[in-house]
Amino acid sequence: MSSIIAVAGGSGGLGRALVERLKASGQYTVLVLARQKNPELEQHFGIRVVAADYSNTDSLVRLQRGQQLLEDQQIDTVISAINPRGPSPELNLIKAADRSKVTRRYIPSIWSGVDYAEEDIKRSHFAAEKIGLTNALKKTTLQWTAIYLGVYLDYYAPGLESYIHPVAICVDTINNAAGIAGTGEYPVTLTWSFDVAKYTVALLHLKGWENKYFIVGSQTTWNELVSLTEDVKGVKFRVSYDSVEKMLNGEVTELPAHVGAYVFLGGSQEGKVRLQGFLSALGLFFARGSLSYEGHQQLNEMFPDISPIGLRDALQKSFTENSRV
């Protein structure tokens, strides 16, 4: 049985954290699948980066001179952290993994806070995308699992090591502002990206997988997050609450951190519309309590030796004077 793990999208974001933890474990040979070669990453980690054309299933299975990407590289497990660019990049990778004679296991790029149901497809393009991945995997012979982590703690604790692009979801801890979906009193799960990577590496040791696992780094509420950050920073936040009606209209409170993100989403006006649409749809799921994992199979309980960083520790690391010395 091969010990080779391929991380698709391993050059940045969660993918890079996964690569670092896999490499540090010393138990696996790690290969990165990327849209283009990355000599700098190869040199930094001492691993191979293979260019993969996600737009074509055949090209994923078969490379130049008849070489097969997954089979010739003896890839046992594919872990995907792909950021979608088009309707089916990862669906093609799933098909290729299923066709490979050596690839047994697959972790899709779910990494979500919400365990979406089929009826959520009508409410959210994001939900449709994630459900599409799990539905595709159900049709394969692969052993697979989806991992749910809540919201990245990285967004709220900038002092933590992270490759995650920051997004102010409900709370902007840097600029002391919040636009909270609903009442802000429902449970919210926050998990650091490197803790997600730790649990994922531990999961690889299991012989069999369930199709869903959940991680709880810290469980809080948005109101508690604001209160705790105010306490740590010694400042008062400007707080607004977005009603269900407002979110159904595709609108949320604009936070200072949102403005800088618009340029990456098509420009000031188009970017604002897109980000507001995404955050309002997400906020509706939050308001119905979708970030509570009570009663679900939690990796925290399966791997008690892993101690994820807590919310207060993360905030203190980010915002106290001692942490910046």
Image (cartoon, rainbow, N blue to C red):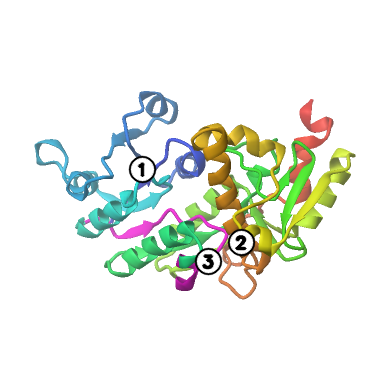
Name the image quarter holding the N terminus. Answer: bottom left
The residue labelled by disc 3 is 115
At label 1, the amino acid type is Thr
Which residue lies under the disc numbered 1? 29
Residue type for callout 2: Leu
Reply above or below: 250 against 236.
below
Marks 1 and 2, Cα distance to the nearest angstrom? 47 Å
Numbered marks: total:
3
Considering depth in this image, is 143 or 139 the residue closer to the camera? Answer: 139
* Marks 1 and 3, how far apart at CA: 31 Å
Taking the view exactly as shown, the residue that stands out farthest to the left is 65
Residue name at image x 88 percent, y 42 percent:
236
Q: Residue at x 59, y 36 (%)?
A: 261
For residue 248, the mark is 2
Q: Is residue 163 visible?
A: no
For the magenta stretch, what is the residue range? 102-121
Q: Is residue 77 magenta?
A: no
Front tag of 2 and 3: 2
Q: Is residue 50 left or right of residue 303?
A: left
